[in-house]
Amino acid sequence: MMNRDMLKLRKDPTIPPSSATVTTSNTNAFSVSPRLGSSNADSRRSGGRQRSSPKGSGPIQSLSPSAVPSGSVAGSTAALMASVAAAGSQVSAVTVSNMMGSGPTTTSGVGSAASVLSSGSNHPRSNRQMGSPTRSNKRPLNNRSNTFKFDTNGTLWALSASPDFSMVAVVGRDVLKILSVTESGAEESVNLKTVGIRNNFAGSMDVKWGPTTGRDAKIATIGTNGPIVIWDVGTQNKIDRTIKEHTRAVNRICFSPQEPNLLLSASQDGTIRLWDLRTRGRPGQVMEAKDVVREVQFNPVSMNDIVAGYESGNIQRWDLRNLSTCEKKFMGHMGFVTSLDYHPSGRFLASGGRDRTIKVWDMEDEKRRELHNIPTIQYTSKVQWRPNKPYHLAACFKDEATVQIFDVRRPYVPIHVLSQHDKDATSILWKDTDVLWTVSKDKTFSSTLIRGLPQSADLLPAGKAAMNCYGQLAFTMTTKGGVDSFEKDLVPKPGRPNAKSVALDGSSEAMIYRTRQTGGIFDCEMFNHEAFIYCAQNYSTEAGNIREACEHNANIAWQANRYRDSQTWMAIKLFYSDMAEPTIVLSQAETSTTDPKAISSRKGEATRGEDGSDSDDSVKPHSKLNMPSLFAIKVSDEPVRRDWSHQEQIRTMLEDYAEQGDVQMCVTILLIQAMEHRHCCGTGLRRSWYPQHESGLYHHSHILLQLHETFGDRSSGFIWILGL
Amino acid sequence: MSYSDYGDNDPIYGDDLADEDRESRPRLMLMGLRRSGKSSIQRVVFHKMSPTETLFLESTSKINKDNIHSFIDFQVWDFPGQMDFFDPTFDTTAIFGEVGALVFVIDSQDDYMEALARLHSTVVAAYRVNPNITFEVFIHKVDGLSEDYKIDTQRDIQQTTTDELADAGLENVQLAFYLTSIYDHSIFEAFSKVIQKLIPQLPTLENLLNILCANSGIEKAFLFDVISKIYIATDSSPVDSQSYEICSDMIDVIIDISSIYGRAAIGAKSEGYLEDQQDGHDDWTQQQDDYDGSNGNSQHPRQGTQDSRPPSALVSNSSRAGSLNNHPVRTSDNHEAFSVIKMGNGTVLYLREVNKYLALICLLRAETFEKQGLIDYNVHCFKEAMDQVFELKRAERTRREMEANQMLEQQQRHNGMYGHG
C-alpha cells in the first residue's frame, strides 16, 4: 500500500498516459526495440538474481524519456535488489532518501541482529586467520607472545591460577595438573593424578587456587566422586584434607580473596558451606536454601558479602555474619544460574543462566531489574569481567568452541570472538587486561593475547537486506558520518525519567552504544488485488483493432497504477504499428508531400488506431489508406507478415511475465495477439509460435479463466484460448 | 453428574487406607483455582493424554486420587478448584498430614491475583499442619506468553508470594517456581524436579550417576521413568532443555519401534532402521499396551456412555502392575532392552533398560562411544549398585502389595462405604 501511495505522489497528473506516447516520435520507437531486446538479454544473463527478485528491472523501463515514473520506481527496486545481492552498504543516496521518506524507519535492530548470527556461526574462524589487513601488518600473528596452546591429553573442565599467574592448575575428567606458564608457552610442572588415583579419584570438576603463595600454597578441587580435596602444593604435593560433609555433589568452590583460609562450597544438597581451613575437623557453617546451588562467589571488596546462584534461577546475597537467612534474593534467570562474577568494583554482578543471557545487576539497587542484558548463543558456562576494563567481560558457552568478549554497552555484537579451540571451551580466566586463558574439551590449555585482535564488529557488513513473502524488504545501512567508532557512538542509556543512572566505571551517566546504522522497511508490493480486479474488469480483448485494444489497456493499466504494464501495452502497440512502418519510412519522402493524412497518422497512435478500426481488417486498409504503393502491398502480403520481426520480443516479454507469475498480463497479451492473428494471419504463423507458450501458459490461463469468471464479465474470450 | 467421570476410581486405596501404607506412599497434591489446568496436567503427565484433548476435560468436582505405580509408588491427588479449605468439615490434618509435595497451579494467562491469595492461604494452612511439606508453584500455560513477559510474570509472582509469606512470619517456607506448559516438555521437567524431591535415595542415585559419567566419558545421564517420561535422577551437571527433550523423545521412539518389531509381534526382529538391538522388551511392549488403555479411557468422559464401567484403566493399571510385581522379575541380566541412536552432529544416545520402570539414557560423543565395552560394563556396575540400593525397598513393596490384595478383598466386602463428600 505504501508503495502505491508513493507512486501516486510521483505520478504527474498533467501528463495523461496517452500523451506520453503522442510525444514519442517514430524514430524514437525504432531505437527502442533493439534496446528492448538487449535489456531482455541482460536480464536473462543475470538469471538467478532476476528470478529471485519479484520485480526485476523490467524490459520496458527504458522505453521512452517520458516513462520517468515507472523507470525510477523499477530502478529503485533494482538498486535495492542489487544491494541485497551485494550485501554492501552502497545503496544510492537517491534511493535511500526515497525510502526513508516512505517507510517507517527502524533503528539498528535488524542489521545488528543479523550480524550477531553470522558472527556467532560463520565469521569467528576466519576472524583470526584473516584479520583486518592494517592490524595484521602491524602485528604479525606468528610473532605474538602470550598466544599459545598446550595439550594436556585429557578433557579439561576448569582452571585456576596461582596469585602471581606463574602457575595454573588445570583439571578435567582424568586430569589433575599444574602447569607453569610463561609468556612464550606452558609446560607441565606437577601431575597430581597419581596421588589422586591412590585416593580413588582421577579427575576433578572444579579447581581453585588459594590466595596464599610460597610454602602455604593450597589448591582446592572437587573430586569426581564428591568430596572437596585440599591440596598442599607449596612444599610437597600431597592431599592436605578431604571434606566429605556435603550429602550431594559439590558444584563450585571459592576462596575468599581477603582471608586465604576461608573456602566456600556450593552443593547440590541445597547448602553453601563455609570452611575455615585452619580449624580441622570442625564442620563448616551452613547456609541453607533448599535449592541446588550452582555457583558461589565472594565479593572482591567486602569480605563478608557472598553471592550465590541457584537452580531455580534465583540469585541470593548472603552476609557471612548472619547465616540464617539471605540478605537479598531476586530472580535472575529463567532456569538455573550457571555462572556469576562480581565486578572488580564489588558493586555490580554479571550472571549467566539457562535462558541464554548474561545479565548485569546493580547489587546496591533495590529494584530487581538488570542494568544490561546480553543475549548469547548458548547458555553461559563461565563469565568473567576483564580486569581494568569496567565494561568488558568474557564468556564461554555450553557446546560452543568460541569464547566471546563483550562490551556490555553493545550487547548484540561481541568485541572479539576467539576461536582457538576445536571443541567446547569450558572455562576462562583473565591473566591480565590483555591475556585470556582458556581450557577446553579439546584437551588444550590456551593463552590468547587479546590486544591487536580484529574487532568482530569491523568485519561485519553494515548493510543488510532481507525480503519476506509479503514483498516487504527490510534493510539497514550505515548513515553518513564515516566509519562508526565505538566511543563516538555512545549515547546516554534511555531509562525512566527519574531513574538514577548507573555506570559501571563510576562515571556519572550510564552510556549505551547506539549504532549509526539506520534501516527501514520498503514495501515492494507483489500482488495488488484491487488493481488486478480493476484490470480484469476493464482490459479489452475484443476491440476491433489491436492497437486500439493496446491503447485502451495501457490506459486501464495506468489508471490501476500499473505503470510498467501500461508501458508494455504501449510497446505492443508500437510493435504492431511497426508492421506498416517500413513503408511509411521508405515512402516518407513521397508521402510527406502527397498525403497529409499520413503525417497526421504518424503523430499519434490514437489517430492511427481510429483509422484502422474503420475497416474490418486492421492492417490492410490502414496501409492501403496511407500508402497506395508497392511497399504497402508487400506489407499486407502473408509472407511479409510471417517475417514480422517482433516475435522474439513478444516471446521474451511473455516469458518475463510468466516468470513473475503475472498471469493476467500473459493471458491478456496472448488473447490480444490471438485476436489479431485470427483476424489477419494464417494458421501457420499462429501455430508456429503459439505452441511454445501454450504448454507453459495453458495452466495459468486456466486459473485466470476462473478468476475472470469471478471478477470480470467477459469470459467468452477466454474459452477460446483453451481451444488453442 | 460428573461424579463418576474421574471420581473415586480407586477402590484399593480409599481414605481408610492403612496408615503404614500411606506413610510409604508419598502424596502429591495438585491444587489451584478452577480452570487453572490441574486435571490437564495430571492427564498429560500420568496418562499420556494428548495436550489438545485436555480441552474437553470437564471440571473436577471431587478429589481425584490416582495411584502411580512406578519405580517409586506415589499418589496424585487432583483437587477441585472450588474446594474451600476453611470449611469445618474439611479435614486439613488428614489432607496435609502426610503430603509429600503440594503443587499449586497458577494460570499465567489469567489475572493471577486471586490465585496468589489462594496460594497464600493454602500454604499457610498446609504449613501449619505439616511443616515438612514441599511447596511447588507451577506458573502454568506459559506457552501463550512472550519470553520477556514470562520472566516478568515469574518475578512478579515470586516476589509477591515470598513477601506475603514473610509478612505472615513464614520466611522459612521455601516455594519453588516453575514455568510450565502442557504443550512442551516443561511440564515433564517440572514434575521431574518435584518427584525427585520425594525420592529419599536421590543423593545416592545422583552420586552413582556422577561416577558413571566421570568414568565413562558420558556427557549427561538421565534415569527415566519410562511410562511418565519423568526423570527421577540425573548427574549433577545442569540440565539443559535440549538434552532432556531429545532423551524423552528417544523413549517414545523406542517404545514405538519395540511395539512394532518387539518380540510380541511374532518373530519380528528389531534390527531395522535404527541401530537398535533389543531383547526382552516384552515388558515394554506391555507398557505400550498400557498407554493405549489409558488413552482409551481418557475419552470416556466425552462419550459419556461408559459411566457405568467403574474400573477405569487407572485401576487396571494398578492391578496390572500389582500382578506383575507378584511375578518374579522376568528380565535377566543378559535379556534387557537397549538401544543406540547415532545423531548427525556426532552425539550418541545410549539407552539401557535398568528395570521394568526405569531406563538409563546417556548422551555422549561419538568418539567416546568407541569404547562401548567399557560403557556397557560401567552401566552394568551402575545397575548392580542400584539394585543394592533398592533391594530393601523392593522387598518391602512386594510385601505391601500382598497386604493390599488382602485389603482389596476386605474392601469388596464393605463395598459402597468408601468415598466422601
Image: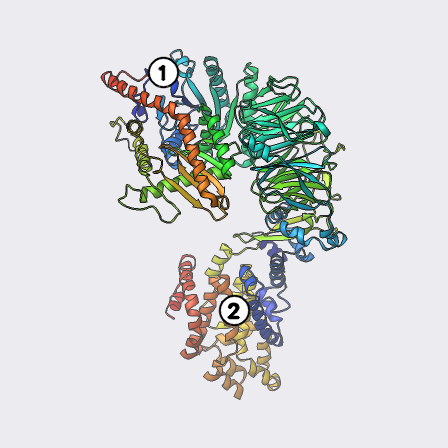
How far apart are labels 1 and 2 at the CA level? 89 Å
Question: What is the crowding at mark 1: few (fewer than 14 residues within 10 Å), some, or many (at least 20)?
Answer: few
Q: Which residue is mark 2?
A: A653
Q: Which residue is mark 1?
A: B20
Residue A493 visible here: no
Question: What is the crowding at mark 2: few (fewer than 14 residues within 10 Å), some, or many (at least 20)?
Answer: many
The residue lying toward the viewer, choosing from A633 and A688, is A688
x and y percentages locating residue B382 in the rendered image: 44, 33
x and y percentages locating residue B106 in the rendered image: 47, 26
The answer to whether residue A127 is above or below residue A700 is above
Tell me which amino acid carries mark 1: Glu
Circle 1 chain: B
The reply, left or right, for residue B326 in relation to residue A664 is left
> On residue B217, which mark appears?
none
Circle 1 or circle 2, nearest the eye: 1
The residue lying toward the viewer, choosing from A509 and A99, is A509
Counting labels gives: 2
The answer to whether residue A597 is above or below residue A376 is below
Check the image and tell me how it is coloured: rainbow
The residue lying toward the viewer, choosing from A455 and A535, is A455
Circle 2 chain: A
Q: Looking at the picture, do discs 1 and 2 lie on one chain?
A: no
Residue occupying the far left of the picture: B413
x and y percentages locating residue B307 in the rendered image: 26, 28
Residue occupying the far bottom of the picture: A630
Q: Quadrant of the C terminus of chain A?
A: bottom left
Residue A659 visible here: yes
Residue occupying the far top of the picture: B88
Tell me which amino acid carries mark 2: Met
Q: Tell me the SS state at disc 1.
A: helix
x and y percentages locating residue A149 in the rendered image: 66, 45
The residue lying toward the viewer, choosing from B223 and A387, is B223
